[in-house]
Amino acid sequence: MRLLFTIFLGVVGFALFWFFQQYNQHYLQTRTQLSSWTKEMLRDETRLDYEVLKNSFFLYQNYDELSSCQKRLQTRVQQAKTFPIFNQNEELRTIYERYEKLLVHKLEQIEKFKQTNATIKNSITYLLRMLQNIPQKYLRQKRIATAILHLEGNILLAKNALDPDFLRSIKKEADLLNSFIKRKDPKEYLFRLLIHTKLFLHTFPSYTATLHTITHLQTIPTLKRLENALEHYFTQQDKKVQELFYLLLFFYFLSILSILYLIHRLSQENSALKELQTKLQRYAITDDLTGLLNRRAYKQDIRRISSPFFAIVDINRFKQYNDFYGNKVGDHILRQSAKILQKALPLHYEAKLYRLGSDEFGVLIDEKTPIDQKRFASAIIETFNKEKITFKNIEFFVSVSVGMTRKRPLLESADMALRSIKERYHRNYAIFSKDLDYFEQIKENIKKSKTIKEAVQKDYILPFFQPIIHNATGAIAKYESLGRIREKDRYESVYPYLELAKEMGLYPQITKAMLYKSFLALKKLQKPISLNISMNDIENPDILKLLGELLKQNADMAPFITFEILESETLKDYKTVKDFISIIKAQGCQVAIDDFGSGYSNFAHIFNMEIDYIKIDGSLIEQLPTSQNARRVVRAIHDLAKESGIQTIAEFVSNAAIFEEVKKIGIDYSQGYFFEKPRPII
Amino acid sequence: MLLAQLPFAPIPKKIAYNKKLALLGKSLFFDPLLSSDKSVSCASCHKPSHAGADDRALSQGVGGQKGELNSPTVYNAFFQFAQFWNGRASSLQEQAAGPLHNPKEMNMSTNLLLTRLQSSPYYKKAFKRLFGNPKITFDMVTQALAEFEKALYTPNSKFDRFLRKEVSLTPQEQRGYLLFKKLGCVTCHNGINLGGNSFQKIGTIIPYRAPFPHDRYEVTKNPEDKGVYKVPSLRNVALSAPYFHDGTIPTLRQAVAKMTYYNLGFYLSTKEQEAIVAFLKTLTGQPPAILQEEE
């Protein structure tokens, strides 16, 4: 609207300017034209009068100049008819028309003057000539001679004085002379004299009248009146032009003001737009729930930081809150956590806080002065411990884990650090270091997955056997079957590949190969063996079927077989494990719990199962010579087992010192490098 | 200024005109295409062989129709204050339209004239070259004719050279010249053209008994203007017989005698007549240069 108005003003202004330009030009043209017109008319009129007088005065004359003056005036007065000004202004037109009428009349009179003037001149010339040739007979008659001289003298007087008063005496003398004429003979002197006199008498009044009219016609005063009227008119017009100019100036300033106003409004609108833009940008990078920055902001910010220190703060077991109390509480906890996190971070870090995932917060700091990661993490963890989050009088104890990193990609490496915590549990913060390098692991995993895939395809999976020693006798009581991969000439443990194999779906094939080949070895050796079996295996019908068949085929071998189940596995599905144990016990097999002491299993549960052996976790065994605590724990396990009629096995017995302690406690069996490494064939 | 006081002035040795336009006018002037039956051209009555006038008493138009007046000369017509015997045209261009349209003269309609010229490759090209416009208009035609007539001036007559003091007149011519002034001829025959600058009545003193066709009265409707005609120029008068408006006077001497009698009121002696005729013969100038010019 405003723009339209300005454009309108501009157009009006331009149109006015154009109009003014045109008007002014036209006005000046008209003015110049009229001014030169009146001047030329005046000049020619004056010239005309002069020529008329000259021609009447001189005996010899030349009408050329007079005629051309007449012609010029004639043309020019007609030309003025086309001047628009005389159509526009009533007064001017009236004066002009009056002048034109007068002039036309004057010019007619001049034409008449030229005729009568010629006649008068001819007669005068002739009469003068006759004066030179008065016949002798008249010279002798005094009355006639006197009359001739009087006549001629009066004619000359009349002509030169332009006075018709002499005509009466001329007529008197002419009458007198006429009485002397005896016959009307054109050759007769008096007769000729009187013809010319009569012509003179006849022409002279109209001649003088014409001259009088010509010299007294009010053409020049009328022309001057016209000139004055024009002058007056143009003075009025000047005022109009000036007014128009002021109007133009007014519009000009109005346009400029309007443009200035428009510019002002534009800049205002611009800043409003900029504000909106900033707001939108802020929304785009803000997390709705917590008001922290979001993941998009994080992605933008990390690019700008040269020495980043980054931490992921993860709410422990957040999923439980959500599951137990619903999303509303979950959201509340997240909002409060964001506040606590802000409180926990000293201002000098100039930390930026992000919500990265459902229960993950990010802290990004440009590390200008080195940060003590331990103090950094502890501050956060302790603040969370101190601050309580309540919702409708329910108090929640929210704890967090902190994964930190300085290595790009930040999010991934911090996540690695975080995962390392979850795996360990004894700390709730960690910083990313090279051993946590997930990327190396990825590379490694790729390599490993190739290896295991090839091993399964080419049947390179085979059991190695490690003897288990009866402590009391030192005799080999049985062998533990341990999975190995043949890789060219080397063999390596299959255990590092198992997780990968599970993910790749190769695990059942590995188990099948192990079971099959272990049974073959058993038949050949005819010695007791110990087989590792996992929860995955127990839950896999194919494996169970194979196991059933193998046991069926080697029913007599059943008592020679011990199944080892990891302590941690019993935690997952107690009932399934218990059922499995019952079944294989019924077949005559024995059962051992592997790595006992590494987990947090309920002893009552374990001892409720019909198990034969407990294999105490290697990490405890290794510490026996050095740790009183380990010794107490191992002794307690052993005592408990003894009381339940369960035999014990120590693994990782790698030297004599350990072995001594093992024996001292009274553990029944040992295995480890102190005795023998696992080997292909027994 | 001194010359301006004199009743006469010489024809300029050279006057400026548009030569190309005048030469186109010349072609038109001599072209019978300009008359309806293609029988007459301007030059049929304004004969270059006869000082731009007609040797016949009354001029003849298309179909042999006789006019009522003796064609006045086109030579030096440019110096006249008005054209035609009665001065009804103020310019040569205006005059040129007259005979073209006059049914007794060339009897041409504007359309027919333009159609004829347009279909002539020569005129088409010539007009286009001059006016830059392929469409010929009537105004262009009369402009060209007028420009040619402007060029029909006859300079360097003996009288002009005498006025310029280059030669002297013979005693008889000198006598004639003085008589011309003294008797009053000069009152009407004055100026550069010795005439052509006023209207006068034929027979001011002794009534001239003859019909006055197309007189000044026809223009002004003023009864005083009956028998009034434009005073003819005396330039080249010796070459342009017959004389008077109706071409009834075959010789110059007769014309001088008659004019003196009717307009001055007296008889001239034979000697005086001869002297005046001798003077009038000094008014014969050089033929117009343009007649020799080729395009």
Image (cartoon, rainbow, N blue to C red):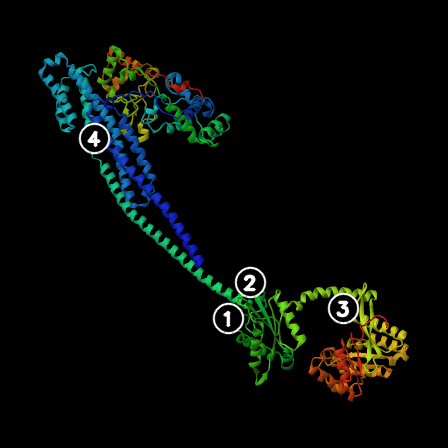
> Mark 2 belongs to which amino acid?
Arg
Residue A51 visible in image: yes
For the N terminus of chain B, give its image quadrant. Answer: top left
Residue holding disc 3: A504
How many labels sit on residues? 4
Q: Kindly report which numbered mark, 2 or 4, lies closer to the viewer in this rendering.
A: 2
| A383 w.r.t. B238: above or below | below
Choose the circle earlier in sequence order: 2 or 3.
Answer: 2
For the C terminus of chain B, give its image quadrant. Answer: top left
Q: Tell me how far mark 1 sits from mark 4, CA to CA.
A: 120 Å
| A319 w.r.t. A28: above or below | below
Instruction: Name the mark on residue A348.
Output: 1
Choose the circle earlier in sequence order: 1 or 2.
Answer: 2
Q: Are marks 1 and 2 on the same chain?
A: yes
> Mark 3 belongs to which amino acid?
Met
Judging from the image, what secondary structure is the residue with disc 2 in? helix
Residue holding disc 2: A304
* Residue at the extreme left: A142
> Mark 4 belongs to which amino acid?
Leu
Q: Tell me how far mark 1 sits from mark 2, CA to CA.
A: 19 Å
> Which quarter of the figure has residue A174?
top left
Q: Tell me how far mark 2 sits from mark 3, CA to CA.
A: 40 Å
Residue holding disc 4: A211
Circle 4 packing at 10 Å, graded few (<14), some (14-19), many (20+), is many
Circle 2 packing at 10 Å, graded few (<14), some (14-19), many (20+), is few
> Which quarter of the figure has residue A135?
top left
**Residue A490 image position (x, y, % from top left):** 80, 65
